[in-house]
Image (cartoon, helix red, strand yellow):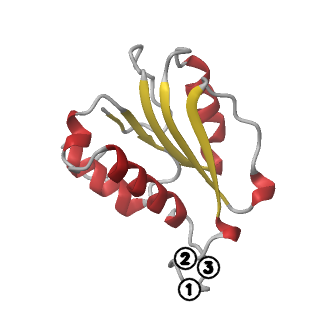
Amino acid sequence: MLLVDQNPPLPHDALRVLFAADATSIPVLREMLSVLPICARGQVFVEVESADDVVPLASPGRVTVTWLARDRRSGVPGTSTACAPGQALERAVRAWLGEMYVEPETVATGDHVVWIGGPPSFAYDLRHDLHELFHVGTPADA
């Protein structure tokens, strides 16, 4: 299930999650994580400008929170170009989905609740691809 609202109500049966967002979405992430059942499992990616922006974010024991500091990453692997907003998060989410779902189309039929936070332009290509996989229209339509 793909949640398209920026402050979505979390389904009561959200036991497997993939949340990804930027620093502006930390309050929403904190709220979403606080209402997950203790048996929930999954992954949270939070992209921030620098490691100084990392803050404590409590989650159920089987939900891993990974911080992606852009100042410690290159924009294109193997180069010295700066990491643009959304770039580190997009790479991380695509890698995680590729590991969890070998066939991209199975994401839509899987049991994960997927949410991408942040402004509409943040990780735009990832949002667009997820909207297509879940058949919910383009991010501009959502």
Q: Which residue is mark 1?
A: 79
- Taking the image as shown, residue 106 lies to the left or right of residue 89, namely left
- Circles 2 and 3 in contact, beta carbons < 8 Å: yes
Q: Position of residue 121 (x, y in %)?
A: 45, 61
Instruction: Determine crowd level at label 1: few under 14, some 14-19, many 20+ residues with C-alpha closer than 10 A.
Output: few
- The quadrant in which residue 111 appears is top left
Q: Which residue is mark 3?
A: 82
Q: Amino acid at mark 2?
A: Gly
Front residue of this view, candidates 9 and 18: 18
Q: Quadrant of the N terminus?
A: top left
- Circles 1 and 2 in contact, beta carbons < 8 Å: yes
Q: Amino acid at mark 1?
A: Thr
Q: Residue sitting at 45 percent across and 60 percent down?
A: 90
Q: What distance separates the C-alpha of mark 2 from that of mark 3?
A: 5 Å
Q: What distance separates the C-alpha of mark 3 from that of mark 1?
A: 9 Å
Q: Secondary structure at mark 2?
A: loop
Q: Which mark is residue 67?
A: none
Q: Residue sitting at 25 percent across and 50 percent down?
A: 102
Q: Nearer the viewer, mark 1 or mark 2?
A: 1
Instruction: Determine crowd level at label 2: few under 14, some 14-19, many 20+ residues with C-alpha closer than 10 A.
Output: some
Q: Amino acid at mark 3?
A: Ala
